[in-house]
Amino acid sequence: QVQLHESGPGLVKPSETLSLTCAVSGVSFSTYYWSWIRQSPGKGLEWIAHIYYSGSTDYNPSLKSRVTISVDTSKNHISLAIRSVTAADTAVYYCTRLADGFDVWGQGAMVTVSS
Amino acid sequence: ALTQPASVSGSPGQSITISCTGTSTDVGGYNYVSWYQQHPGKAPKLIIYDVINRPSGVSHRFSGSKSGNTASLTISGLQADDEADYHCSSYTSISTHVFGGGTKVTVL
């Protein structure tokens, strides 16, 4: 059974860097794309970035200048870093697998940006 | 972002359709449209992928289609548990993904 589990700081100060980790279990890490998707309170979903197990990446153009996605295949972890955060980055952040659609989701990690 | 109606409602047993409008660089250009159901406080759940396909375990009451730059999700035989938010997504010409704003379905 494929499971994804996000972890993060919960609270980040404005202008700092938000860092999240997704632990993947129950599936071979290879042959899939792994994405981060977020949802601001009361809003729709926003795709942030994805990474192939080989390290190939694509980013949402509106976030590309501030975002880095990376993978640690030895630990089956996917990481996300968002620099220079503002209140607009307050959201639930989901880690997902892209197979036929985004077919597996983590439970989400709530991150609040506030001083 | 893709364009979805903010809300759609229907009575139990009825059918409703949710539209998802994009452009030729996303919805119209690829058969990679997917739909997600999200109940309050829960993670989204995939219900349709590649425009028309249902994952194993998803009810046959959910069906997808596409015409030009607009994809659609139809829920037939509406049930109380169908009350949720529904999100569409598409692959794009720049190798990214884009979502719609979401549609709140209310069962009257």
Image (cartoon, coloured by chain):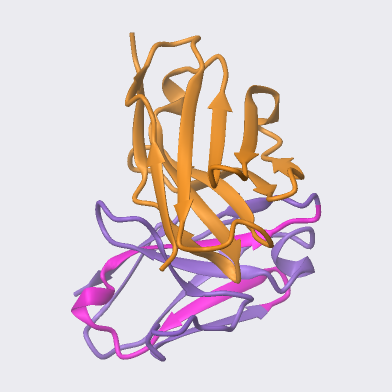
Chain colours: A orange, B purple
The quadrant the C terminus of chain B occupies is: bottom left
Q: Based on the displayed image, in which of its 4 quarters is residue B36 positioned?
A: bottom left
Q: Is residue B62 above or below residue A94?
A: below
For residue B1, side relative to residue B91 (left or right): left
Observer-nearest residue: B105 or A5?
A5
Q: Residue at x 46, y 27 (%)?
A: A89
Q: Is B97 within the magenta?
A: no
Q: Is B81 within the magenta?
A: yes
Q: Residue at x 75, y 48 (%)?
A: A54
Highlighted magenta segment, given as a residue range: B67-93
Observer-nearest residue: A1 or A66?
A1
Tell me, yes or no, if residue A92 can be seen here. Answer: yes
Q: Is residue A91 above or below residue A58?
A: above
Tell me, yes or no, if residue B5 can be seen here. Answer: no
Q: Residue at x 71, y 74 (%)?
A: B31
The image position of residue A96, as x and y in percent, is 51, 54
The image position of residue A11, as x and y in percent, is 33, 20
The image position of residue A105, as x and y in percent, is 43, 57
Q: Is residue B105 above or below residue A29?
A: below
